[in-house]
Each structure stands twice: as C-alpha cells, then as structure tokens.
C-alpha cells in the first residue's frame, strides 16, 4: 500500500513553527532595548555643601536595566548611587518591568569627602536591555557644575550694637562679591539687608529687631549666603538687655463677646462659626490673630527700599497708655483660664472718636477692616518698617496714598476686639511687632540708628 503524503495543514504547521522559532531566535539574538532617556538637573547653580541633583531615567518598552550616578573631578570617579533592574527578556512584549526611576542625590562637601573647588561632572550612565548577540553601549548624560566651597566674605562695620528684648537696632556691614542674600537672623525671624545709600556696591545695612519672646541674644547672627548656600556668619551684638514683661488678666463677659464676636465673623467669612459664643471668641482671639500676624509679615514684601521718614515717630496726642507692649494676657471665663495671648502693641486712649495722626511720613499699605484690629490703617515707612493703627471708628485714607507725619488717617473707636474706644498702635519690622517707645524717642533714633548709618539715613 502506498505511503500518504503529509497534509497541507501539517506542512503549514511545520512552517509556522519553524518561522516562530526563527523569530524567537532573532529576537533573542538581536532585540536590544531602546536607549533610555536620561535627565539630570541641579537644584542650585553649582555644588556647595549639599546641592540636590535630580535624576530621571525612563525606558517604557523593555524597561530599565540599571544605571549608576558618578561624580567625576579630575582623575577621581566616585559612584554616588547605583540601581539594577530586570528588564523584559528580548522575546517578551509585556510583563512587569521598571519603566521610570526618579532620584534626588545631595552632592557637596558634606556628602563627598575630598571635594575640591573648581569644576565637577555629575555623570549618569544608563544601561540598555541586552540580547544574546547585542550588548549595546550605555547612554551617558553629564552635567558639569562649578564647585564652590567657601562662603562669601562678611565684615561688620558698625559698632556699639546694644539691643533690648523686643527692641530694634541697625547694623552696617560689607559682603563679598559672591553674596546673593544677606541680613540678620534672629531666631525664626529674617531681616534682609539692603544696599547702603551712598556706599559702594558691597556696603550693606539692615534694620533688625529682637523678638519680644527671645531672651538670649546669642541667637542673633549676621549672615551672608552665596548662590550654592554657603553661609558666612558673624556675631555683632555688643550688649543684650532682657526685658521683663507684665502679665495681665482679662475677664470675658457674655455682653462683651456678644458685642465683638458677631461683628468680626460678619467681616471675616474665612473663620467658620463654631456654634457657640465662647468657642467663636477663642477662634477669633487665636486663629484669626495668627492669620492677621501672617498677613502683616506678607505685607513686608511690599515695603519700598528707601527711608520715607526724616523725624521721630509721633505718639497719639494727649493719650494715656492703657496697655503696654508684649503684656501677656490671661483670659478668664466663669473663673477659669480659657486662653492666653500676647498683646503686641500699645493701647492708647484720650477722648472718644479722637483724631488719629500718621506717626511719620509713608505710604498707606492697608486701609480696611482687618480681623481682630477692626478698622485698621497700616503705613509703610520704608525698608520693612510699618506702623499699625487699629480699632478705628473711621478711616479717611486709601491704600496707596502718600501721607505725611501728623496727617489724620482716621478716628479712634472700638471695632475689632476692643473693649472700649482707644487706639491700638504697633510698630513692626518685617512684620514683627517691636517696642514702639523706641521709635517715639528722638535720642534713641539718633544714637542707635543715625550714628551708625550716617548720611545714608536722612534723619533731621
């Protein structure tokens, strides 16, 4: 009997299997992964103490095979980071793989020993997925950066810096060419430096203050920083005088809270109703007080960099001091302490609806209802120096208006958290309330500011 020939189906099957085998062998032998994309960027314009280097490596097809990050300076090559992954095999088209990696490495003198000034390369070498017969060259991306390890020079020029807790002062100094930011750091508060009027390009000065709650002058430093955050520090305080502050007690009555709280909430929709009078009062006295303080700090960024005033600051005429600066107030309700806040200004009172004068020349930055202060005027006197007039019954100036010393800005009142008709007056530096009595004193201005600043300060 004759032998049968294979059917056409069987032949086609053999051909298909053979083709698949050849395709498999071809993929395994020659299908290397595509080049991964590599991005390298620096968070600073050079390498200092700790410069963040941001790295992104991506390959969405076969996935990442691995990469390493190197620092190259001269003949020295140091591996800063290394990653390995398992990409898809050459014959695989789907499956689990790492397609993207983001990494931030801090590079600088504090993380790499023996780093030298000059230049250095941050090099990322990203491997490609291999095949049996192809081991393609890796992708290399290099970022060249200057290495700066020395902080700017910093020299204190002025002398006899005597400060009081809660008070203000000035310092004159000189910075090196590499400085991009300078000023006084006092605890958490920053007082920026400005070019000294009439000086050369490296002469600087700063008006600064001691926070009312800072009892240690060693926390006050003059700083100069370069563009890679190398910092020079200098001590310059010759004498620090702590100042004891008084404690006061305030009894909260239903009548008082019913008068002030609803009016403030009506004008301040961002403070939600807590459902009862006492909780609403505490929200106003605490949360709204903090918000108002932050707004005053933000306003300091709008201050003009020049002296707008030439004479001592005026105190309210014929006024009696009702509350001093930085009194610590304990609030009692039904015989129990329910809150504690610091009164950061002077309460001054004379007659009802008394005329309120601008304490000095300046520009009106704020003239509106302002939280706990009610109807309020804030005047910019230049270089971050403000005065605030709160609890007014009426305002007669507008924001952006120039005012002169002694010009009427409004009348006293009892708006906001006021128990009666009076003026809440505050002097602020960069948003920090300071002791106003210094700025009322012409001798203090002459001795503490004018003698240091000389012709740079147009004080008469």
Image (cartoon, grey):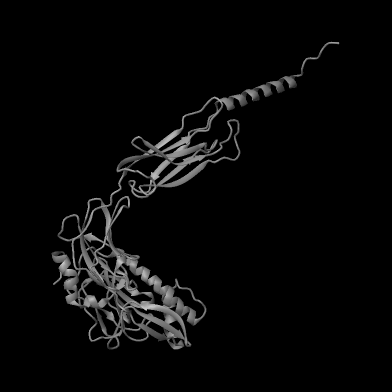
Q: Position of residue 411 (x, y in %)?
A: 28, 82
Seen from this angle, which residue lies furthest front?
A: 114
Above or below: residue 127 compared with residue 46? above
Q: Position of residue 137 (x, y in %)?
A: 46, 29
Seen from this angle, which residue lies furthest right?
A: 1
In this view of the protein, which residue sits in the foreground, 338 or 362?
Answer: 338
Q: Position of residue 76 (x, y in %)?
A: 37, 37
> What residue lies at 23% left-to-right and 80% top-to-bottom?
315
Seen from this angle, which residue lies furthest top?
A: 2
Q: Is residue 35 toward the left or the right of residue 289 in the image? A: right
In this view of the protein, which residue sits in the foreground, 231 or 115?
Answer: 115
Locate the C terminus by quadrant: bottom left
Residue 399 seen anywhere in this rendered image of the structure: no
Above or below: residue 26 compared with residue 290? above
Which image quadrant for residue 443? bottom left
Query: How many numbered markers are drawn?
Result: 0
> What residue lies at 22% left-to-right and 84% top-to-bottom?
317
Q: Position of residue 10 (x, y in %)?
A: 74, 21
Q: Is residue 391 toward the left or the right of residue 131 in the image? A: left
In this view of the protein, which residue sits in the foreground, 270 or 132?
Answer: 132
Above or below: residue 228 compared with residue 94? below
Which image quadrant for residue 325? bottom left
Above or below: residue 361 compared with residue 32? below
Residue 273 seen anywhere in this rendered image of the structure: yes
Locate the N terminus by quadrant: top right
């Amino acid at each position: 009997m004759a032998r049968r020939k294979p059917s056409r189906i069987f032949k086609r099957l053999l051909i298909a299997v053979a083709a698949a085998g050849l395709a498999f062998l071809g993929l395994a032998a020659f299908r290397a992964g595509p080049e991964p994309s590599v991005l390298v960027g620096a968070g600073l314009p050079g390498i200092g103490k700790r410069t963040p280097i941001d790295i992104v490596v991506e390959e969405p097809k076969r996935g990442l095979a691995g990469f390493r990050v190197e620092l190259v300076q001269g003949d020295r090559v140091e591996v800063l980071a290394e990653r390995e992954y398992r990409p898809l095999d050459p014959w695989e088209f789907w499956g689990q793989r790492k397609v993207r990696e983001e990494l931030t490495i801090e590079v600088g003198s504090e993380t790499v020993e023996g780093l030298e000034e000059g230049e250095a390369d941050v090099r990322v070498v990203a491997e490609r997925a291999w095949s049996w017969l192809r081991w393609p060259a890796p992708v290399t991306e290099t970022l060249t950066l200057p290495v700066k390890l020395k902080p700017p020079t910093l020299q204190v020029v002025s002398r006899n810096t005597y400060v009081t807790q809660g008070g203000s002062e000035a310092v004159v100094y000189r910075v090196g060419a590499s400085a991009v930011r300078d000023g006084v750091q006092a605890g958490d508060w920053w007082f920026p430096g400005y070019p000294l009027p009439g000086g050369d390009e490296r002469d600087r000065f700063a008006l600064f203050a001691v926070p009312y709650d800072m009892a240690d002058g060693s926390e006050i430093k003059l700083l100069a920083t370069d563009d890679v955050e190398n910092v020079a520090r200098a001590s310059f305080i010759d004498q620090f005088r702590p100042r004891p502050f008084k404690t006061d007690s305030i009894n909260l009555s239903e009548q008082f809270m019913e008068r002030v709280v609803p009016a403030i909430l009506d004008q301040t929709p961002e403070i939600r109703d807590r459902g009862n009078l006492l909780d609403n009062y505490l929200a106003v006295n605490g949360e709204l007080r903090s918000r108002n303080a932050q707004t005053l700090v933000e306003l300091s960024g709008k201050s003009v960099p020049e002296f707008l005033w030439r004479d001592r600051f005026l105190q309210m005429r014929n006024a009696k001091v009702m509350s001093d600066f930085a009194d610590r107030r304990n609030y009692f309700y039904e015989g129990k302490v329910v809150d504690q806040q610091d009164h950061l200004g002077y309460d001054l009172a004379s007659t009802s609806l008394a005329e309120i004068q601008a304490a000095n020349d300046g520009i009106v930055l704020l003239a509106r209802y302002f939280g706990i202060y009610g109807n309020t005027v804030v005047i910019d006197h230049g270089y971050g120096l403000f005065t605030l007039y709160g609890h007014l019954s009426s305002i007669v100036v507008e924001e952006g208006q120039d005012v002169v010393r002694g010009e009427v800005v409004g009348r006293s009142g009892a708006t906001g958290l006021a128990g009666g008709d009076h003026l809440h007056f505050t002097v602020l530096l960069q948003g920090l309330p300071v002791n106003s009595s210094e700025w009322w004193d012409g001798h203090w201005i002459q001795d503490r500011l004018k003698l240091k600043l000389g012709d740079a300060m147009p004080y008469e």
